[in-house]
Amino acid sequence: MRPRRLAALFAVLCLVAPPVRAQVGGGQGTQIKEGEQCPAGMTEVRPRSCQAPTMPAPSIVDYRPRNTLRAPAHPVPKAKYPVIDYHGHPGGNLMGSQEGLDNLGAALDGINVRMIISAGNTSGDQLKRVVDLVKASPKMKDRVRILTGIDLRSVGSPGWAEKAIAQMEADVVAGAVGIGEVGKGFGLSTKKADGTRLKIDDPALDPVWAAAARLRLPVFVHTADPPEFWQTIDYNNERWLELALFPGRRYPAEQYPAFEQLMEERDNMVKRNPKTTFVIAHMGWHANDLGRLGKMMDAMPNLMTEVGAVLYDIGRQPRAARDFFEKYQDRILFGKDSFQPEEYPYYWRVFETRDDYFDYYRDYHAFWKLYGIDLPDEVLKKVYYKNALRITPRISAEGWPK
């Protein structure tokens, strides 16, 4: 066949033959529209083109890819400066005997936590027993401090506020340095004397908050849980694995107040009591929205916060997090929550280094990696201990670095 006829035949074939779509990976593709998600079992391999793996897909708990990134790594076993853990839960085995206290001290030494604040919401005889035990320990008498609790179960009954304030004053005499942790049941499930839900901004609580201001006691409050716990439990929920592992952490709308309602009540409480220092736990569950938390800080000068159990959000936004910590360096405390000594170094590494892309310590909290935010020394000192000393005058500043 002559060359001209071959060229003409090729041109005809190009016009009539259907286009061949490249099959990336060898599987069958499915087209989707702009803004749509791929069908279940498929992923987007090209714009608007979905494909299923040619091998069986692992479950979310079995997929553990090895990190091939080779970057400088600077683990930090001990904090650069001594630390006050403002959100401490050392547990009864460490707080129930002199031997337990000695073991606690050894664990704290290993991570450079000089003082831990036991935020167990204890009061009365129980608080006095713990304080007396600590005072009797030559090694730990200056390393553990206790927060007093408030019994919220009978708010609204005659004389409740007077009784609560009297107990608070007695606990201060016994050695309490603040109030808390006022737990997440406050607002979620705690009932008043008449059986109705105790709202966080209930005016019946105001005399107690005023007494806290008079006694110079910071109030440490844990409100709600991550907002994802209220959201639909599907594969778009960042906390799906956690909610699948711990179904009791779900908050069905028909049983619990909405997340935003609890946030509004909390903010009302803080604003209505401007002389009282409130420390909101877990960065208020706004570590994933630092702009919102910053606006709260600006609007409520009596508000402090702490970083317990939200490192996964701090460490995935290193530039924004560093900017936030520098701007609000006088308003942030260190807190850890669950006392697992081997987990503290992750905080030190995020706060003190510029490391890239390293593991977080609990897969069900975060399936992503962390980055160091490299805080300046003066900011580290404030977060680690200076801010805690400033807002808690019943903790002696003697012996702490200036």
Image (cartoon, helix red, strand yellow):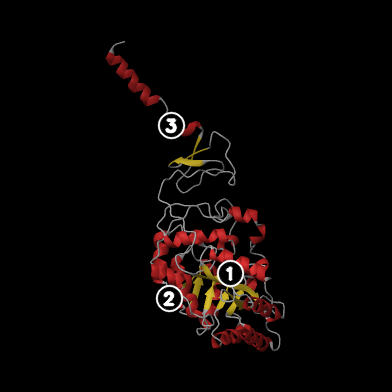
C-beta proximity under 8 Å, tags 3 and 2: no
The residue carrying mark 3 is 22
The residue carrying mark 1 is 88
- Which of 51 and 169 lies nearest the eye of the viewer? 169
- Image quarter of the N terminus: top left
Indicate which disc, 1 or 3, sits on the residue closer to the N terminus. Answer: 3
In 3D space, how far apart are the residues under numbered discs 1 and 3 (Cα atoms)?
57 Å
Residue 334 percent across, percent down from the top left: 50, 69
- Which of 118 and 293 lies nearest the eye of the viewer? 118
Outermost residue toward the top in this view:
1
Is 10 placed above or below 265 here? above
Residue 153 percent across, percent down from the top left: 70, 78
Q: Write down the quadrant of residue 40 in the picture.
A: top right
Front: mark 3 or 2: 2
The residue carrying mark 2 is 298
Residue 210 percent across, percent down from the top left: 56, 87
Residue drawn at (64%, 84%), measured in percent from left and top? 174
Front: mark 1 or 3: 1
Tell me if 39 is positioned left or right of 379 in this view.
right
Name the amino acid type tagged 1. Answer: Gly
Indicate which disc, 3 or 2, sits on the residue closer to the N terminus. Answer: 3
Name the amino acid type tagged 2. Answer: Asp
Outermost residue toward the front in this view:
138
Q: Write down the quadrant of residue 324 in the picture.
A: bottom left
Residue drawn at (45%, 60%), measured in percent from left and top? 350
